[in-house]
Amino acid sequence: MSDFPWLLAMIAVPAIGAAVVAALPRERALLAKQVALGVSLVVLLLAVLTTLAFDAGGPRFQLTTSVPWIPDFGSDFALGVDGIALVMVLLIGVLVPLVVAASWHEADGGPRPVRVFFAWLLLLEAMMVGVFVATDLLLFYVFFEAMLVPMYFLIGSFGGPRRQYAAVKFFVYSLVGGLVMLASVIGVYVVSAGVLGEGTFAFDTLTRLDIDPDVQRLLFLGFFIAFAIKAPLVPLHTWLPDSGAEAPVGGAVLLVGVLDKVGTFGFIRYCLPLFPDASRFYAPFVLVLAVVGILYAALLAMGQSDMKRLVSYTSISHFGFIALGIFAFTTEAGTGAVLYMVNHGLATGLLFLVVGMLIARGGSRRIADYGGVAAKAPLLAGAFLVAGLASLALPGTGSFVSEFLVLIGSFPERPVFTVLATLGIILAALYVLLMYQRTMHGPARGVLLQEDPAEPLPGAGGGGATATATLPAPQRSLRVADLGRREIAVVAPLVALILVLGVYPQPLIDLIEPAVVATLDDMGAASGGTDR
Amino acid sequence: MIEAPDLSWAALAPLLLVFGAACAGILVEAFVPRSVRHPVQVGLALAGTVGALAATVLLAGTREVTAVGALAVDGAALLLQATIAGLGALSLLLFAERSLDPARSAFVVSAAVPAGSPRDRELATVPRVQTEVYPLATFAIGGMMLFVAANDLLVMFVALEVLSLPLYLLSGMARRRRLLSQEAAVKYFLLGAFASAFFLYGLALVYGAAGSVRLSEVRAAVGTDGGGVLLVLGLALLVVGLLFKASVAPFHTWTPDVYQGAPTAVTAFMAACTKVAAFGAILRLLYVAFGTAEWTWRPLVYAAAIASMVVGAVLGLTQTDLKRMLAYSSVAHAGFLLTGVIGLGAAGTGSGLAATMFYLLAYGITTLGAFAVLTLVRDGDGEASHLSQWAGLGARSPITAAVMTLFLLALAGIPLTAGFTGKFAVFRAAIEQGAWPLAVVALLASAVAAFFYLRVVVLMYFSEPVADGPTVGVPGVPTTLVLAVTAAATLALGIVPGAVLDLAGRAAIFVG
Amino acid sequence: MSETLPADGLLGWSWLLIALPLAGAAVLLLGGRRTDRWGHLLGAATVATAFVLAVLCTVQLAGQDGAPADVELFTFIATGELDVTAGLLFDPLSAVFALLITGVGSLIHVYSIGYMAHDPGRRRFFAYLNLFVAAMLLLVLGNSFVALYVGWEGVGLASYLLIAFWYTRPGAATAAKKAFIMNRVGDVGLALAIFIMFAQLGTTSYAGVFGTVGTLAGGTITAIGLLLLLGACGKSGQFPLQAWLPDAMEGPTPVSALIHAATMVTAGVYLIARSAPIYDLTPTARAVVLAVGALTLLIGAIAGCAYDDIKKVLAYSTVSQIGYMFLAVGLGPAGYVAGLAHLLAHGFFKAGLFLGAGSVMHAMRDSVDMRRFGALWNKLPITFATFGLGYLALIGFPFLSGYFTKDAIIEAALDRDDVWGWVLGGVAVLGAGLTAFYMTRLMLMTFFGRARWEEGVHPHEAPPVMTAPMVVLAVGSVASGALLVSVFPLSGWLEPVFGEPAEAEHVVAPAVIGLVVTLVMLLGVLAAWLFVGRREVPVAAPVRVSPVTRAARNALYADAVNESLFMRPGQWLTRALVWVDNRGVDGAVNGLAAGLGGSSSRLGRAQTGFVRTYALGMLGGAVVVAGALLAVTSG
Amino acid sequence: MSLSYYLVFAAILFTIGAVGVLVRRNAIVVFMCVELMLNAVNLTLITFARSTGTVDGQIIALFVMVVAAAEVVVGLAIIMSIYRTRRSASIDDANLLKY
């Protein structure tokens, strides 16, 4: 069973699917959607089967396939998963079908053909899978950069009013990081050539060479800057609120839910094992960024008047927790951080989707345009509440487990940072409940009082604009209808997953832990959490 | 009594084929009736270049110095000749495009007629085509191929002129916007002559110091200590002449004006082939003649590389004309290529030579393709090269926009395109030689450059179409062929560059 | 603490205690409108069943004379050195709480059937109520601090949902948010305490922590104790986190009765009692607990004297009474039992009082302004009777529950036999007087005097489904004290948890204390009659009042302090940061881009288009190149 | 008399030519200045041929003349065409392409 190239299939299927969708004639929009949904479901199936084929107790990298790619660069087309990559692939597999379903009407009636949207979505999926399963540094880099293109087009072609600005900002920001990283990637290669005589990009080999600490510090910076831009750490974060706000909801979900995780994934997969000394050297500095980010972004989230910007800022705050967990160098915190990546993907994904559904009804991204929605749309409000509670890491939701692990694991090593970070959970409660109260509670306000839904609201967001345009006439008349069947089908699985992972996270932990332990061993850190 | 020099005809075959085709072309002009002249000329020119390409392939592996040491036929020379011949052939196809311009050709019927005169206006519409361009271009191609094989400063100088003079003329032969075209020709000519004077003076000084212009003997004279003031001055002036052709800052000033003014097909030809030739010569000069004293010129090249990348990238940001923007991009890429030149170790060891040659190929293909797309988008007065006219092109003709996007992403160096592989190769070479600061600057510069490539993408896809936008012409067979080949190659060199890189690696040899 | 037995028999099923209400909540929430018709019945049924189960479990526990039973369920989180098992600990302490929660809980469920009969959201209400019961049971039954924390935040959520039950009222929504936030502040303390336990002891289970806590340095133990206290204060509305509890009265009255009087707010007391092994080791932390208790006791009592909102008065009374309990458990071994006894008794009479208040509001068209009540005693006989009994129990009328439990606390305080003992005892006695005053005031304003009803109000007694629970609770309030102290001594039952009650020789004879307290109580009643009962109660609250009254009306300015210390600065900070982020951080990025563009156009000027300029540039370049090369070679 | 005089003289000629290119406006004159530079080079070559005692220098000089002739043909053609269009040989008038 495990000799079937699962990983390759998970890259190839969506890539081919994208080509097929793109090749469909313009008027077959519905077919394009159905194909996209089908393909993404196939990928989900593949991801699940891969997980079954994966042996948590086995060697670190499994289901590996490797063929020579660019011999001249010593680079192979090498794929393989460890627990960390596997859970991320699972996350992708789960999120994409939901995003496809949620974006069903996203591109309808817009100036650009529907099929293009879904083609980019599938291509993005292929790239994202590739980035996580690549075990060759150059291959990883290639996916890392190539991943930008589909997202760039998703934001730029289907985004909100300021989409041009957001798309270019997103692309250039990431590209700068990526290019700086390229210098380090080549640097690692050259170092390996110096040590082994023959340069290589193979992850296993690279982790085994011990690089001179001073060189490490330089190379580390290259990687770190790139990843710190991806998983926005303050102060390199300002692209995310723009992208998150302007991107179509589906794009935003994948952007914050998966794409940005590549940054934190990079920290734990590449920064730590490749540059152990540098990681230890820079750890205090990184932790400062992380903790500042947690509090700073949380406060900023409170100050936002645009729901999508608000959610973006909450994510920046959460990424601070993940970085904290990774750079605490303990098994508990590391496992928690990786688990956090998954749970944050689900929680923020749900939050973005629900906010998107609300915007699709109200046609505005401004919190002030809503109020008392819960009375009109209890299901929507319920989903919103679950998402919000997951985002503030309430026990019973998956986020709690991961946040708890990160904090309790970091505390023994870094008490001060952890205490400061823990204050973040108060702020989290504030920004979530403020938004919830203003939109869902209180007397009917804003769009609920709008008589004529046809005329757009002041400051109506693009996502909303396209979406309201797409709502068939009957739905339009009552502006804030409760969730429809399709929307329930999108929301329900996420809610279920969040709750299940909140009660019984152990299976995922068992997947993740060995990889984390291996990483910490690679860097020779105390993998036992505390040394008593 | 003079004994005839020994010529290894086989090794010279590529050059002979091209020059033969060129000379034949002149005879055709004289004797073949106008009605069939065009197809004959095109066929002839293509036969010459493609034949040359084939010949280089057959010659692969040859390593000899022939023609009394005037020519070096080695891996590098053959690969670069093949590149030039191939790109030249593609450019000739662009020349031969007849279905885009309503008047069946992008070249003026009679360059002698004053622009704007009644006669000119009447000629502008008649579907007569002018065929001198083919022999001219063929001569230029021959000159370039000679340039990269020259093992002797005199041959290098002659080749330089042989490739330059036709280009001066070609850039003045636009059918539309003739004033710009003529201005471009004048500027290119005067500055080119000025530069070649420098080159020549450098040649003279080197000759004075080394007593010969044979690269091998120059090397002997240079030794490891640089070999005295005269040689160094000579080197300086030679380099100036070559950097001019390679449009490296601060000798790039002609590039934007000429690229913008010249007929787009010619611009494509210059951008793709001249670069290759110029860098071939630079590599040969620096590593065969002055390789033993590289410490003398390394700082200079270092500085020139940075200057080029910065000037190209920064100035490109605010350009509003696509051809001009691509010109600055070519300046920036000259800088990246110099990074690869730095990547050559002492006496040409290291992966720098292979990397640079690969980059030349990748860049040539990509930029040729980009200019080819440019010829498609037209308004009443020829190509619509102003950025604003490209707004919303993605909606109007998705294929064209997609192809252009591919080329732009490649120029920006996004992975899975030829541009990325090339960048990676040259930067690796540079870092291997410890020049990582240069690599970092280069990477930042390419980030800045990416910004203006993206502007075009943004315009094409993310802005709404303009009211009276340009029309996208349906390309004839030649242009279609060019677009297909370049696009395919751009992708192939990005996704599976292994074979070509390997070839470049094996070809990375200088004799002499 | 005696060794735990593997849970067998019924105790093995004790997880059903949590599962049943949880299932009820799930069915009601997911079932949607289909369950509207019978939803409330299901909700009440699950809790009632849970109560029966709890009784049976307790019986079995008594059978194995209180040896605690540990119920391992499944591995919750296990990685590295952390190993958290989801498991329950059913020991006398948790048994007491389980009985209180399910018992009072089921009564209030029944009551709510009537109270919410006409509310469109009744199903939702019962779902939330079930959710609360489940979370609260997890809180008291969990066998580790993590389990407790989960339940801890779970009840917080339920409380949030129920306070905001009528979410279209801005007041309710805000109060709910405030409650959740202030609880979160406390939760941070609890979380940090757990972190320290793990960092220092490598475990978070009760057994593990209590077994090894002795090995820690005194400072660490004190830190844990204080952090736990912070959590307790948040949940139990103790100083400095008391401000949310009165606002929480925006919720439906049954909620106030169950959550904000009988059960959830006493979780803090449970936490401290549960953590007795820790507090026994840290006098410092205990002292702080005492201080908090005493202070809150007074704050609550004083504020209670000034409000005209019947529910607010009861709320401050709750704050004050929990202050008594904190004071008690702060005394250490001597006081645990007394505190818990008072907790149980309070559970009965305060719930009863709230239900009574609810029935009054029910009669008065949901008005809570006591100034518009009056002369209801004959209109609402049952309510009056039950409420009256609750009142007597609360003010400590001899031989009703409050009398026994409160005196026990005062005894324990005085038994410290030091100056602090006298201070605390004094405060407690003073509190008793104040309690008597404000409760009497409430009684007088509500049931006696002239009818000051708004026009169109026709008071009528509540239906039996509501009065029945009130009767039961009234009986409880009368009897529980005597039962718990003498007949069925709590101290004996809790012995497995807190160990042998030290037989302290009393500094002051209990009889004397009883006498003093009774006198003070009578003084309070008298004062109330002098101030309120004798003269006419103005319909509008008098404006020109003494600063003391004004301070009391503002709950001693707790909200004002919170606002000026945290809320406003926070808002300013947020606004400032938003500016910094847009102008500063992002501005830097955009500025960089703009700078590049500017330099681009400036550099572009050099491209003049004049051949001669270009030539000059080239010549200059050539000179530089030559010069550079010469420089390199010559030097 | 030393050959270096010739070299210096040639250098001066070259400089004059270069400066001429910079200061003169008339395209023809500019072009003649370039030719002057070429001839300065020729002089240098001859001188070096003399000093090194090889004939290469003289041969190269011949080549240069041929090339220069070719350059003149091309150059004048271009300059003529633009002159006929613009009725002016001033290179400063050719200034449409800039920035």
Image (cartoon, coloured by chain):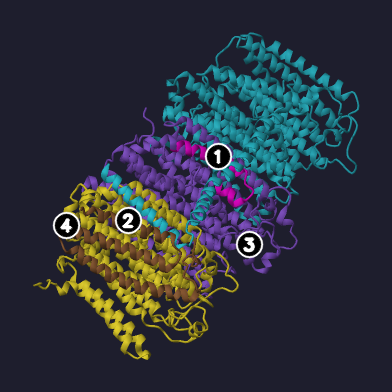
Chain letter for the brown part = D
Amino acid bearing label 1: Tyr
Residue labelled with disc 4: D52
Chain letter for the cyan part = C
Determine whether A428 is above or below A21 in the image.
Answer: above
Asked if one can make out residue B251 in the rendered structure from this viewpoint, the answer is yes
Determine whether C317 is above or below B483 in the image.
Answer: above
Task: For chain B, give the colour.
Answer: yellow
Return the residue nearer the eye: C525 or B222. Answer: B222
Callout 3 touching callout 2 (CB < 8 Å) = no
Which chain does the residue under circle 2 lie in? D
Amino acid bearing label 2: Ile
Q: Position of residue C307 (x, y in %)?
A: 79, 30
Residue labelled with disc 3: A465
Chain letter for the purple part = A
Residue labelled with disc 1: A296
